[in-house]
Image (cartoon, grey):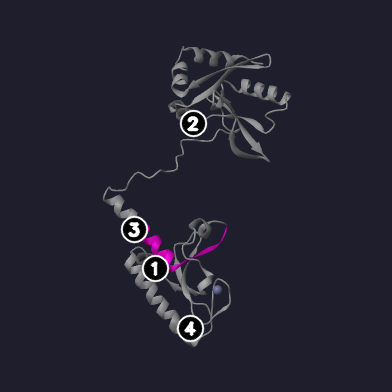
Amino acid sequence: MNIFIPLPKEKRAIKEECRKQIFLAETQMENILKNQIVICAICDKTISGRFRSASRFKKGRSEVNLHPVHIDCVKENAKLTEVFGGDKVYYDLSSIDLLIMSGIVNHLTDLEKEGKLPDIPKETSSFDMPSPDTIGDPFYTMVEVIDGKMTGGVINQIHDDEQLIYLYVSENIALRSRKEGNRRGQLENYVVAGVSNNTMEQVLKSNKKIMVVMGIEGSKAIATAMTGAEIKDAIQPGEWLDNIIKLQNNRKN
Ligand SMILES: [Zn+2]
């Protein structure tokens, strides 16, 4: 037989209560194991002798069940990405990890309530990777694509010991640069990608220099290295870069 003992949500929420429930469940498991043949729900083999309890979560469901497993069938200190990653229908976490997890969550909730939660770096959604699906407003760049997937690489070049990312003032100029690169056997894995408004805002705040390509003359790019702040000034209405952008985006080729 399999043993699954529900661990209700309200009991899970409080660490001490959770610990008590695990203890009670393990006592119950021990008693059943004395008299019956119990199967480990992870490896499907009989448990005889030592066991530990694991908590089983079903994907997309809120219930958790405690069940006995062989000592080696769940890891302590499991990497949560390994436990919860992948396409598994359910996950098994050791009860000790469950307690640690509940401890961390409660601690963070308490700190947040008390206004003591320090600023923890959060994933920011304001930086969208330039992509071939994005329409530049107006800037474009080139991103590396290998086997149909973006690698995260953006066209850049070392200039005065600094690695500068390239921004093109129009899609047309980016396309022409790429064509010119291809002619010389370069930029084979690069595709033209639009830079979103959000990303451009981040770029303009940056002190890092960026190579701004304003045009192509013959086979040469007309470009200048500028910081985000310099670009910001130069793209104000009527300023020199704004004029170039207007000119280049009206010019059909
Ligand atoms: Zn097992």
Going by the numbered disc 4, the residue's amino acid type is Leu
Question: Looking at the rendered structure, which numbered label has been put on residue 106?
Answer: 3
- Please state the extent of the stretch shown in magenta in the rendering: 87-104
Are dots 3 and 4 in contact, CB under 8 Å? Answer: no
Mark 2–mark 4 CB contact (< 8 Å): no
Task: Determine whether 249 is above or below 2 in the image.
Answer: above
* Residue denoted by label 4: 33
Quadrant for ligand 1 reads: bottom right
Picture coordinates of residue 56 (x, y %)? 48, 67
Residue placed under numbered mark 1 in the picture: 8
Residue appearing at x 41%, y 76% in the figure? 25
Q: Quadrant of residue 124?
A: top left
| Distance between the alpha carbons at the discs numbered 2 and 4 | 60 Å
Pointer 4 and pointer 1: residues touching (CB < 8 Å)?
A: no
Q: Earlier in the sequence, mark 2 or mark 4?
A: 4
On the rendered image, what quadrant is the C terminus found in?
top right
Q: What is the three-letter code of the residue carrying label 3?
A: Asn
Task: Determine the secondary structure under disc 4.
Answer: helix
